[in-house]
Image (cartoon, helix red, strand yellow):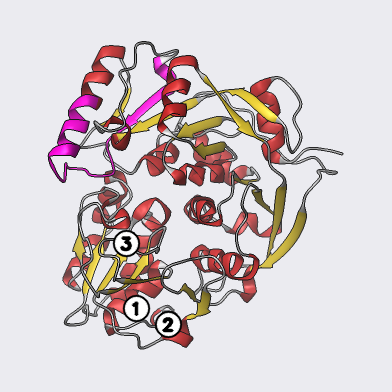
Amino acid sequence: MGMTIIEKILTKAGGVPVKPGDLATVKVDVACLFDNNFMASVWRDVLHVEDPSKVVVVIDHRAPAAHVGSAHAHATARTFVEKFGIEHFHDIGYDQGICHVLMAEHGYARPGGVLLCSDSHTCSAGALNCAARGVGSPDMFYAVCKGETWFRVGETIRYELTGQLPHYAFMKDVFFKIAGEYGGHVSQNVEFGGPALGTLPIDARRTMATMGAELSAEFATFEPDDILFDYVKERTNVPFEPQIPDPDADYLDKREINLSEIRPLVALPDSVVNNSANVQDVAGTRLDQCFVGSCANGTFDDLSSVAQVLAGRRVARGTRFIITPGSQSIYRRALKAGIIEILMDAGAVVTNSTCGACGGGHMGIVGAGDTVITASTRNFKGRMGDPTAKIYMGSSATVAASAVEGAIADPTPYLS
């Protein structure tokens, strides 16, 4: 039998053919360290870096520093960067952003490559036909020092995308469809392709790949196409070798998702797996806070959809609406397009790019008993702050419509 995308990437990176059940030792093309790696409770003094050109350091989770501990971590990161001459360093400032967003924006994630980071949403780079996975800090330090890592090769589920998304539905809704209908994908890989791929911009693909972590997938990868090649070539001159599945690739299962049938969905509080509902089923639920941001939904396209909903309208009295772009580059682009003005005139608060409220680190921590709807990555108890808060999840457009009404709302009437 032939190989899936992830099997072909790992075979190329390790030099040995792999199949499900194997342990694959592979060369790492990019190792990304972020500020959590440099926290005093985690950091171990690195004595050697195999290849500084393959290391990226990003300050993103609490940027600017949210407390003394994060300030110390940032200082440790700067010392590390200086000591080993790390050129790819994204400190607080012009090139600031969430690490997974920067992996795409700066061409660090390349088709056919292997990318490592200790944040679970590293699978975001799978949208760029990359084998990207989050690992623990000890494995990260090993990869930085030795230039390699290992994976257990899992079986792959193929999602064939057909049709075209309606104007009122988004890839976040597609994710809720998959998570609600098929549940968890523990120790499995997910692969996306099909005739609808050409209708999906890179931002949409990144949303889906990022949310692969919430399925507990090992890897989430997309087939490459001309849209991807143009995107990557605009950002890097480094050669890359995209991988496509063999015609006779062996999948655990093949499933078709007709995008034309997708409707606005939400994830109910405390879980995203087997916990989806039509937005109409919970419409009218009173909200204290709405949030749009994170590595999954802080894209320019997300901000654009929010602006379409908010234009000429105001955030409901008694509801907070916090918006966090995924990078300062996205922020600047939205500013030039007039989007930021629309968001702020409506009463939303736009923060600098950071992980912020998504992980309950800062920039919008929720309080006891709050009810929230978020276009971010997770909604388990305590994720965004107090464990008594109820966290619903929706697309950015659903969150924006809900902010206008002060209660969970269907975005369809707001989108032309």
Along the line of sight, which residue is nearer the eye, 315 or 149? Answer: 149
Which dot marks residue 3?
A: none
- The answer to whether residue 69 is left or right of residue 29 is left
Residue in the picture at 72% in, 64% down:
256
| The quarter of the displayed image where residue 154 is located | top right
Against 368, residue 203 (above or below) is above
Q: Determine which residue is flagged by label 1.
A: 401
| The quarter of the displayed image where residue 363 is located | bottom left
**What separation in Å lies between label 1 and label 3 (alpha carbons)?**
25 Å
Q: Earlier in the sequence, mark 1 or mark 2?
A: 1
Residue 8 part of the magenta-drawn span: no
Residue 140: x, y in percent? 44, 28
Q: Nearer the viewer, mark 1 or mark 3?
A: 3
Q: Determine which residue is flagged by label 2.
A: 410
Which dot marks residue 382?
A: 3
**What separation in Å lies between label 2 and label 3 (alpha carbons)?**
26 Å
Tell me the quadrant of the picture where the N terminus can be found: top right
Residue in the picture at 12% in, 39% down:
68
Q: Earlier in the sequence, mark 2 or mark 3?
A: 3
Q: Amino acid at mark 3?
A: Gly
Residue in the picture at 40% in, 34% down:
106
Residue 294: x, y in percent? 35, 54
- The answer to whether residue 116 is left or right of residue 86 is right
SS at badge 3: loop
- The answer to whether residue 106 is left or right of residue 290 is right
Along the line of sight, which residue is nearer the eye, 386 or 332? Answer: 386
SS at badge 2: loop
Along the line of sight, which residue is nearer the eye, 72 or 96? Answer: 72
| Circle 2 residues within 10 Å: few <14, some 14–19, many ≥20 | many
**What separation in Å lies between label 1 and label 2 (alpha carbons)?**
7 Å
**Cβ atoms under marks 1 and 2 closer than 8 Å:** yes
Q: Which segment did they paint magenta? A: 52-76
